Image: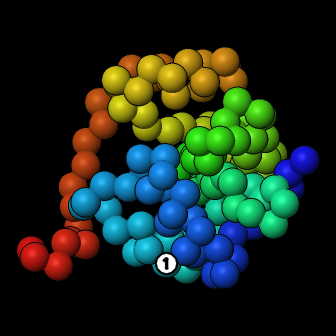
Amino acid sequence: MFIIRQFTNADLDDVVILWESCGLTRPWNNPETDIFRKVSQQDDLFLVAIKDEQLIGTLMGGYDGHRGWINYLAVHPHQQRLGIATALVQQLEKRLIARGCPKLQLLVRKDNLNVLNFYEQLGYDEVEAVCLGKRLISDNPLD
């Protein structure tokens, strides 16, 4: 069995290791910086799953007053397909509903078919939209 709780600073190293083992990190996104930025929001939407005192899953949720967001959903490769990701998403959904959040969205790379199928099974549909982005602060020390 596993539990879901809010991220604590003591989880930092284990979260980064998990994200790296799941292929979620990218050279242009420093995971520690992303975590520090999220923790500064103090919104209790950064969740971790723990089993036998080991961190096995994460979900970094957000809410901007208009819609909720899912980021960094990860489950340790040896713990996948056991309901952990589903439980993390459902826990975030409950927390967002309690805040009055009407809509929850996420971004998935088009070629990540397993993840797309996972979210479709949870009732998420593709939204007809184009994602645009602009880097406001460079996390790359070489820039």
Q: Amino acid at mark 1?
A: Phe
Identified at 42% across, 67% down, the residue is: 31
Q: Vertically, is 108 above or below 66?
A: above
Neighbourhood count class around disc 1 (C-alpha, 10 Å): few under 14, some 14–19, many 20 upward: few
Question: Can residue 90 be seen here?
Answer: no
Rendering quarter of residue 128: top left
- Residue pointed to by mark 1: 36
Q: Nearer the viewer, residue 63 or 28?
A: 28
Identified at 85% across, 51% down, the residue is: 2
- The percent position of residue 105, horizontal first and vertical second, equals 54, 37
Point out the image quarter for the C terminus: bottom left
Total marks placed: 1
- The percent position of residue 62, horizontal first and vertical second, equals 58, 56
Identified at 38% across, 55% down, the residue is: 25
Q: Is 105 positioned to the left or the right of 31 in the image?
A: right
Q: Is 47 positioned to the left or the right of 70 in the image?
A: right
Q: Vertically, is 8 above or below 73?
A: below
Q: Residue furthest right?
A: 1
- The percent position of residue 101, horizontal first and vertical second, equals 69, 46
Q: Is 22 positioned to the left or the right of 119 in the image?
A: left
